[in-house]
Amino acid sequence: MKIQKSRKEERLNKLMTAFYDYIGECHIDNICAETENLKEEIDKIEIPETLDERVYRYINSVKGRKSRQRFIAKFRNTSSRVAVILLALLFSLITLTLSVEAFRVHIYNLFFTDHKEFSNAKTMEISDENNAISGWSDYYFPAYIPEGFYIKSAREIEGIRVIKYVNDNNEYIYFIQASNGTEISLDTESGNKKEITINGKRALFAEKEGKNILIWNNEEFSFHLTSNLDERKMKFIAESLEKK
């Protein structure tokens, strides 16, 4: 009985397998037939030529965008390299310029040394050789002098030019111009001394017994004002110098 039942099940399985195979083949045939019908319908459709043109234009535009993107990327990379090179070149030129100017331009500094009875003011030239500047060709002249003053005397002693101004009120102004490197001794014992600025440069102002002294310099000369005028007027005079 068991053997017969087993054979019956085996035949049933084979029958079902054959049935499924048949169904699959029929389904495939239906798909193929439908595909053929669709192919015939597709072949009947007329595609306008303008569609090709639009497609080609779209393709070209995509290619153009990609080309522009590649160009921009290359340009950015190249411009970054060029910027670095230009920056390095600029630093090199600045360094070279500063090196050249170091031989051409002397840097001046005003040193003040206090002693017991005198204050020495000497404009030192800072350079490799520390050589003093010599020679005198031009001169500076105050563009501002308070009203009522006139020149009483003017003289030159060993490269030092001195102009004396006076007025009718017994007020006076001594204006002295000397080459940088000239040492000037000032009687400032028991006097008040302070630093001020003249046209942005360091200067020394001293007061003693009604006499005021102002010393400053530029790249060419040292200047010295002695007067019984107040600090404000003396500063106006100092800042008004013009080269003649």
Image (cartoon, helix red, strand yellow):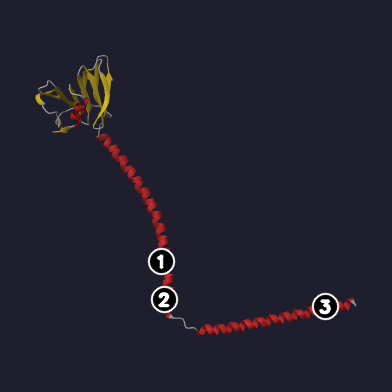
Check disc 1 and report its element: helix, strand or loop.
helix
Relative height, residue 90 to residue 219 (above, below):
below
Residue contact between numbered discs 1 and 3, judged by CB atoms under 8 Å = no
The crowd level at tag 1 (other Cα within 10 Å; few <14, some 14-19, many 20+) is few
Percent position of residue 183, x then y: 21, 21
Residue nearest the observer in this picture, 8 or 77: 8
Residue furthest right as drawn: 1
Q: Is residue 76 visible?
A: yes
Outermost residue, top side: 116
Residue that badge 1 annotates: 64
Is 9 drawn above or below residue 231 in the view shown?
below
- Of 224 and 40, nearer the camera is 224
Amino acid tagged 2 = Glu
- Tag 2 near tag 3, CB within 8 Å: no
What x and y, as percent, mark residue 218? 22, 30
Q: Earlier in the sequence, mark 1 or mark 3?
A: 3
Quadrant containing the N terminus in the rendered view: bottom right
7 displayed left or right of 116: right
> Of residues 127 and 173, which is closer to you in this image?
173
Q: Quadrant of residue 49?
A: bottom left
189 lies above or below 182:
above
Residue ID at (42%, 61%): 69
Which tag, 2 or 3, sits closer to the chain's start?
3
In this figure, what is the number of numbered marks? 3
Residue 230 position in % (x across, y down)? 20, 24
Q: Position of residue 124 (x, y in %)?
A: 25, 26
Say what amino acid the circle numbered 1 marks.
Gly
- Give the residue number, with chain letter if any, for mark 2: 53
**Residue annotated with mark 3:** 9
